[in-house]
Image (spheres, rainbow, N blue to C red):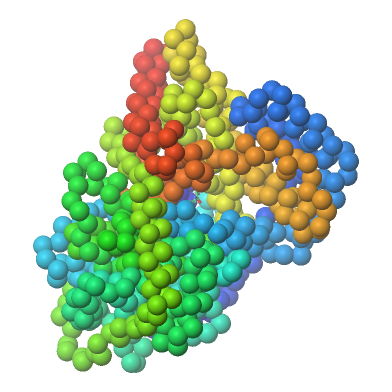
């Protein structure tokens, strides 16, 4: 979670009890807060063009840059840019957020790659040490109760508004993560939120040994089940799903979206299948009770769990124990594995991790108290009729999943030497410090820098999602080159680090206030498509392609819980890097693809560790010298 986010203190115990069946109603306070949020601005065209050229400087050749300079000049002076800008400004006047729907579609719903590995992030939670199966079930029951408490806070509008730099943030994403599911379409997917407009669902889905169950979490009078009751229902589920030879229907959801779209239509031709799919889609969230995975050394354990949350480990293991379209899936493995995977279209990482922090805190306080014996119906198992066509689709999905599993290279680095307190003590922004370490690591491995993406929040604006901080700058390049130049003194290197960090901080500030370049450039391109004008040359240019090819795709997702988020790389020859800088240590999850000979997650993790240590030494040496 963002460290600079200020939240009203959360006291779960004081959350007003209210029925889970309460439909989502926007009460005046939330409406007032939401309505008062500013609209996302459209940045000035000239400013974006200038910043675009400056951003290209460290990542393209002089010739390419010169060519792009001319194209940008034509774009500005030829009238095309102004026309598109005017259309964008009109769109901004007419909509709550000129970007949000375009972004949801172009970044997520139009994307045809599988959601597993390619777009859905996972979260690795601390390992649990269950003594027995009951331990696992108790833990799962507490976790479910914690999430339902969180849901009550959403339903009753008692979720505290978050603030950043004293400004309230848009809370809409919290209202999108429960009761929702992605649905594949032939060209574009949709996300259906079942709490909106109708009465809220009262069941979750639980999957064990590839078999899905409806677990109603409310009694007939609408009161929530106790932890003990949920525990007993989970026991029943477990006992009704002991067979391990069931078809892993859920693995279909891991397919390329067009393939899954076709398989989906095959699957729901059958009425029983359609009803089962609908029950999963409508559920509040899913809990995956995973089978144990092959044991690995303690050193590799977190990396193994990161892979498991991202893809389930393959057709033989837990990949069929998922419905990857479901927005929220919690994973509780028999072997103590604990985490979640979420479908990215409805929300960013920070609200998800905030939910985790809340649930972990709830679980700490929750005692299982034996409930009076109220007979509860056995949770309903969802039936699937496996026709030969569906069977063929499942076999194809298994093969593809196994290929994805082999291709994903994951390394979780538990960096124990220092956390964000160290850069702070040297008056440096911790986020910028980590970003510079990533720049240094990349430069040392490849002797060049690359196009880098760092997500930054736009939630100061109504329905804001993210923009991009381009961490590679001329200042970051000067710093990493100085680190590799034996002729440079530490004082000079330190001055260059400070300058690079300051530049990064300034870009972060601009981005948070809606003045970054990437979403604006995307808007201009989409506007050209919408206006049916021919595509401006700046979008057909090599520099544009280089800038969009993010060899480093990064994000800070901080939390109170000692966890780490992870996601796959954006490009075949790139890295995905997600980090959680805690006060005295950091967790980083690094991914790459094995099919690319140039990338290697463990080597990059080592390079990042070395870079962080060298930067610590640099700060400490120069501080000593000035004492
Ligand atoms: N000296 C001392 N302390 C400093 C400092 C300096 N020069 N600069 C910053 N700090 C402090 C800050 O005040 C803050 O203090 P706090 O811990 O008391 O709150 C802390 O260091 C952290 O600040 P910093 O590291 O600079 O950045 P940040 O935590 O604000 O995070 C972003 C920056 C870009 C990650 C964040 O703004 C953001 O947008 N996050 C969203 C990411 C996202 O949505 N990802 C999507 C994933 S799916």
The image shows residue 602, relative to residue 555, as above or below, that is: above
Q: Which residue is painted at 14% across and 68% down in the image?
A: 133
Seen from the viewer's position, the closer of residues 399 and 339 is 399
Residue 456: percent from the left, percent from the top?
A: 54, 47
Q: Is residue 465 visible?
A: yes
Seen from the viewer's position, the closer of residues 42 and 599 is 599
Q: Which residue is painted at 66% across and 60% down in the image?
A: 102
Q: Which residue is painted at 30% across and 36% down in the image?
A: 415
Q: Which residue is painted at 43% across and 76% down in the image?
A: 389
Specify whether 420 is left or right of 141.
right
Residue 367: percent from the left, percent from the top?
A: 19, 70
The image shows residue 231, relative to residue 590, as above or below, that is: below
Specify whether 134 is left or right of 104.
left
Specify whether 521 is left or right of 108.
right
Residue 520: percent from the left, percent from the top?
A: 70, 48
Seen from the viewer's position, the closer of residues 216 and 606 is 606
Residue 517: percent from the left, percent from the top?
A: 67, 43
């Amino acid at each position: 979670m963002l460290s600079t986010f200020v939240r009203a203190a959360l006291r779960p115990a004081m959350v007003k009890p209210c029925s889970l069946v309460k439909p989502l109603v926007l009460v005046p306070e939330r409406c007032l807060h939401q309505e008062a949020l500013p609209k996302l601005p459209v940045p000035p065209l000239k400013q974006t063009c200038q910043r675009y050229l400056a951003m290209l400087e460290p990542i393209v050749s002089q010739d390419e840059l010169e060519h792009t300079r001319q194209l940008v000049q034509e774009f500005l002076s030829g009238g095309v840019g102004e026309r598109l800008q005017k259309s964008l400004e009109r769109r901004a006047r007419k909509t709550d957020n000129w970007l949000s729907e375009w972004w949801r579609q172009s970044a997520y719903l139009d994307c045809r790659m599988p959601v597993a590995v390619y777009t859905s992030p996972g979260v690795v939670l601390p390992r649990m040490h269950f003594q027995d199966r009951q331990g696992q079930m108790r833990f799962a029951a507490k976790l479910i109760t914690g999430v339902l408490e969180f849901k009550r806070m959403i339903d009753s509008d008692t979720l505290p508004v978050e603030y950043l730099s004293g400004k309230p943030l848009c809370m809409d994403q919290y209202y999108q993560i429960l009761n929702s599911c992605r649905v594949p379409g032939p060209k574009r997917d949709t996300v259906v939120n079942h709490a909106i407009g109708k009465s809220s669902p009262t069941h979750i889905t639980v999957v064990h040994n590839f078999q899905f169950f409806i677990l109603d979490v409310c009694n007939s009078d609408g009161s929530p089940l106790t932890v003990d009751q949920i525990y007993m229902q989970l026991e029943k589920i477990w006992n009704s799903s002991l067979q391990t030879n069931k078809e892993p229907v859920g693995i279909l959801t891991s397919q390329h979206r067009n393939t899954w779209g076709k398989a989906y239509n095959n699957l729901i031709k059958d009425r029983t299948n359609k009803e089962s799919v609908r029950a999963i889609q409508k559920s509040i969230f899913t809990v995956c009770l995973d089978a144990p995975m092959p044991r690995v050394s303690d050193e590799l354990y977190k990396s193994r769990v990161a892979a498991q949350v991202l893809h389930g480990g393959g057709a033989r293991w837990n990949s069929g124990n998922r419905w990857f379209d479901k927005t929220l899936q919690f994973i509780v493995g028999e072997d103590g594995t604990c985490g979640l995977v979420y479908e990215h279209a409805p929300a960013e990482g920070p609200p998800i991790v905030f939910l985790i922090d809340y649930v972990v805190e709830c679980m700490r306080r929750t005692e299982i108290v034996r409930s009076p014996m109220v007979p509860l119906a056995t949770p309903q198992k969802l039936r699937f009729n496996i026709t030969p066509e569906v069977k063929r689709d499942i076999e194809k999905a298994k093969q593809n999943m196994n290929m994805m599993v082999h291709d994903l290279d994951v390394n979780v680095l538990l960096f124990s030497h220092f956390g964000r307190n160290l850069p702070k003590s040297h008056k440096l922004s911790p986020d910028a410090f980590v970003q510079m370490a990533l720049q240094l690591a990349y430069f040392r491995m490849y002797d060049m820098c690359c196009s880098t993406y760092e997500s930054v929040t736009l939630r100061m604006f109504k329905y804001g999602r993210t923009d991009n901080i381009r961490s590679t700058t001329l200042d970051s390049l000067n710093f990493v080159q100085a680190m590799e130049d034996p002729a440079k003194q530490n004082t000079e290197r330190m001055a260059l680090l400070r300058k690079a960090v300051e530049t990064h901080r300034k870009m972060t500030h601009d981005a948070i206030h809606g003045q970054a370049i990437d979403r604006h450039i995307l808007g201009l391109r989409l506007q050209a498509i919408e206006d049916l004008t021919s595509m401006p040359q700046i979008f057909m240019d090599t520099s544009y392609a280089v800038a969009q090819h993010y060899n480093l795709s990064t994000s800070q997702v901080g939390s109170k819980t000692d966890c780490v988020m992870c996601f796959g790389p954006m490009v075949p020859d790139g890295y995905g890097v997600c980090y959680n800088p805690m006060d005295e240590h950091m967790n980083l999850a690094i991914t790459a693809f094995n099919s690319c000979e140039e990338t290697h997650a463990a080597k990059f993790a080592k390079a990042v560790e070395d870079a962080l240590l060298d930067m610590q030494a640099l700060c400490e040496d120069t501080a000593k010298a000035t004492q």
